[in-house]
Amino acid sequence: MKLYNKPAHELHEMLAKKKISSVELTKDVLARMDETEDKIHAYITETRDAALSQAAAVDEKIARGEEIAYFEGIPGAIKDNICTKGVKTTCASKMLENFVPPYNATVMEHLEKVQPVVLGKVNMDEFAMGGSTENSAFYPTHNPWNVQCVPGGSSGGSAAAVASGSAIWALGSDTGGSIRQPASFCGVVGMKPTYGRVSRYGLVAFASSLDQIGPLTRDVTDCAHLLQLIAGHDGYDSTSSASEVPDYTKALVQDVKGLKIGIPKEFFVKGMDAEVEQAVRGAIEQFKAMGADVREISLPHTEYAISVYYLIAPAEAATNLERYDGVSYGARVDGADVVEMMTKTRSEKFGEEVKRRILIGNYALSAGYYDAYYLKALKVRRLIKEDYDKAFENVDVIVTPTAPTPAYKIGEMTSDPLKMYLQDIYTVPLNLAGLPGISVPCGYSREKLPIGLQIIGKPLDEMTVLRAAYTYEQSQSFYKEMAETEAKA
């Protein structure tokens, strides 16, 4: 029996009814990891012994006749920028290659309450800076649908692990699309919650006003349940929302009749892959057929989103990464004096993309350029948010492509960073505006690469986003087919 390609909700039922054991399930997923890891390279650190011990503890609980929680005993993976007590957290960087956190991120504290099985830490672009997981300091991750292609980024390891069956669920982080874009490329479900809905405490900072932790799963049902586990106010995070967390599982109903869906005309522009447009427009027609009220809207400042993002995010990154100086945090390369030591440490231990963004950020924040670049970017960010506020006066959700193309070949864009940055055109506006968004599969390219549909909601209205996503998912066969994919190799 192949257990590794089943969603968590099916596995939970099988565990509760004693049709399988958690140890049996964990061994099945670990065996799948053995089959795929030399091709996919999703993991940086594996915690196999701890995982089997966690699974055995859950089996003992089941044997005593006790009830188990939804993710209890089900194997998953954690993006390697989320602090895990006693387990290395490298951010896929030589700077933190040997860093073992003395504490857990808040999301890990939430997870440990339900005793899931954690298989390890998964690969990513260094410090979450990138859209392909090629910027990892260790090795690139490959797309399970075609190992010649990227899995997306920066949460590429999380998406690839779920898609290949070497994890049933995963956590990622999203600063400009880093959950949703790899979810699109790998044919899984990925959600960026509203900024502040999930605590950032213990998430190694990239851009603090944009970062958000979220789930990557096989389907929308698992996504809702995992979000339920990790959402909530946290006193350790000053940006954490104090709003009450609703029961997201109540959003899992098939009903979009009368739901007002906005289609932004600025998102369907020249340069979008024809197959992506066809798949997304097909999904829009499906929403119409299910009774949704679909209408065109305008988000006029969308064209400035990439420019704004690549001023604000690098500026915050440059500030956050100042702490890695060879003294207080991270690795150290010796030098003749403190200046040479710091210079060598940052030159040798940061990768090229991280150094590029630090330079951009420091330039934007420098005397004489602060007003012209960073301050102006903050003003345009406000205009982008106001576009969405105005649009949501007339619609309940907004539907767009997740990415302008399916997954591209490894190495195809590494020589042209600007071209890769433009891949974020559909995802970065949500981070700038602090909105929730989800990517769900909506089709394939001719080369059988997944295509994702993005559904955007009002602040703190993950319920409506999940309801729309669930209704669409249940009307299609994509998610069932994609859950059963075998890694190509």
Image (spheres, helix red, strand yellow):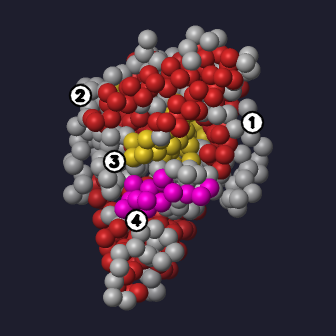
- Range of the magenta residues? 88-103
Q: Position of residue 54 (x, y in %)?
A: 58, 33
> Residue 237 vs residue 354: left or right?
right
Q: Quadrant of residue 108?
A: top right
First in sequence, mark 3 or 4: give its number.
Answer: 4
Q: Position of residue 59 (x, y in %)?
A: 62, 22
Helix, strand or loop for disc 3: loop
- Can you say which quadrant of the picture contains the C terminus? top left
Tell me the distance, in whole angstroms, between the alpha carbons under discs 3 and 1: 33 Å
The answer to whether residue 296 of the structure is visible from this angle is no
Q: Are marks 2 and 4 in contact (CB under 8 Å)?
A: no
Which amino acid, mark 3?
A: Ser
Q: Residues within 10 Å of mark 1 (few under 14, many from 20)?
A: some
Helix, strand or loop for disc 2: loop
For residue 359, above or below residue 432: below
Which amino acid, mark 2?
A: Ala
